Image (cartoon, coloured by chain):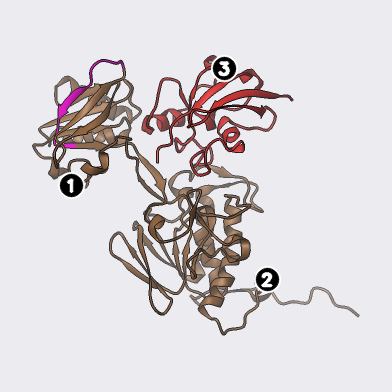
Chain colours: A red, B brown
Amino acid sequence: MADIKITIVDREGVAHQVDAPTDMNMNLMEVVRSYQLAPEGTMGICGGMAMCASCQCYIKSHQDQLPEMSFEEEDMLDQAFFVENDSRLGCQIPIKPELEGLRVELAPFQD
Amino acid sequence: MLIIGAGPTGLFAVFEAGLLKLKCHLIDALPQPGGQCSEIYPKKPIYDIPAYPEILAGDLVDKLMEQIRPFEPGFTLGERAETLDKLEDGTFIVTTNKGTKHHAKVVVIAGGLGSFEPRKPPIANIAQYEDHGVTYMIREPEDYRDKKVVIAGGGDSALDWAIFLADVASEVSLVHRRNEFRGALDSVEKVSELSKLGKINLITEAEVTGLEGQNHLEAVVISSKNGGEPIVKETDYFIPLFGLSPKLGPLGSWGLEIEKNAIKVDNSYDYQTNIPGVYAIGDINTYPGKLKLILCGFHEAAVMCQSAYQRIFPDKKYVMKYTTVAGVNGFDGSKKEAKKEVVKSIN
């Protein structure tokens, strides 16, 4: 299966267009980590269980293509900071072909 | 050997140490052993523990506790390791937040993600009001009698404390980012009822964005999500309740080399830190090629124990033994060993 192109704006405001594979069972948080777009230890700390908010990002396109928020994700975002209406946890967004052209911005890291 | 952190890696280190006749004591900030496996996901399955196609995290902890029982580890639970002092003879004293002192020849940090601490909202001057009107947990509810209190958060603890303090404080405000609350239904209904009775001042779709006061907190600034001028609300206390998140915490100031929010160790040689006699194993360490997996933590525990043994007994000669050959001799007098029988003879 082909890769999709997604644009990730890092915490410094720099936009990166990256190729994300749709056949590797990856999620958005893992794509950010694999391209090292956020320092290790500040992204995906809980390992992708929606138990920290370190992978919070603002989804700027494809809103209608995203999976429904689970109870865990909603609960976590309730306890997080810098939350906006388009906030999601990257670890809960699987990379799939429909997300071709997705644009996301990483939320600030809350120490 | 003193082990900080009673998660799977720390627990398995007790077994490996026991084979070398080293006795262990564990400290953990959580009230029960098992670390994240018990605290966060006891009912979730793990699929990459060798020889267990599937095991629940909670069951893994139970099995580890059973495995290390013969080595009679000591536990200090519900206390967080706070300071590390190296004595002249090369041994260490670790003191917990409750003042318990532990003396050991070797300290092993198996602290996982760190200790769980309250999440602090990103308000610029919040630190200066900590213990001067800002608190992240309620220890003594009577402290708030006849005082004005602002609570922030939308989870169970924010709701429960708002309900409780409604009868204690002179005024309780609950500030939450959304209209919906995710707490238990009972609590949500109760808060809404108290709000109608005027006993809780419910402020939703809003956030506390500023703090004011000379020495002690005097007011909070509340900004609405829907724009408009922020309001300044007089208060004696501000209690943000946003759950817990793991932090390196006090370990960060022990003089250990930190990289990527983890403790740097000298690769796979023995997982020793930059302080000789202090080891770091499991998720809390980092080295080139590090994988944060329970099975890697187990491996690191075994390797670390060989080095720790040499440090504790520099003059003793020792070679690693297989449990199948040497059995397991518990400190409690128990003995497990393979049956000695001739299975094949050569004529």
Viewport quadrant of the C terminus of chain B: bottom right
Tags 1 and 3 on a common chain: no
Q: Chain of mark 2?
A: B
Mark carried by residue A65: 3
Report the side of B87 relative to B288 (left or right): left
Residue drawn at x 47%, y 73% as measured from the top left = B23
Q: Secondary structure at mark 3?
A: helix
Mark carried by residue A55: none
Q: Mark 3 is on which residue type? A: Gln
Marks 2 and 1 close (CB-CB < 8 Å): no
Q: Which residues are magenta?
A: B226-237
Residue B169 rendering spot, x and y as whole percentages: 12, 35
Residue drawn at x 51%, y 78% as measured from the top left = B312
Q: Chain of mark 3?
A: A
Residue B336 rendering spot, x and y as whole percentages: 60, 72
Q: Secondary structure at mark 2?
A: helix
Residue at the disc numbered 1: B140
Residue at the disc numbered 2: B324
How far apart are the two marked residues, 2 and 1, measured between alpha carbons?
55 Å
Residue drawn at x 44%, y 35% as measured from the top left = A53
Q: Is residue B228 magenta?
A: yes
Q: Mark 2 is on which residue type? A: Thr
Q: Mark 1 is on which residue type? A: Glu
Quarter-wise, where is residue A99 in the image? Answer: top right
Crowding at mark 1 (Cα within 10 Å: few <14, some 14-19, many 20+): few
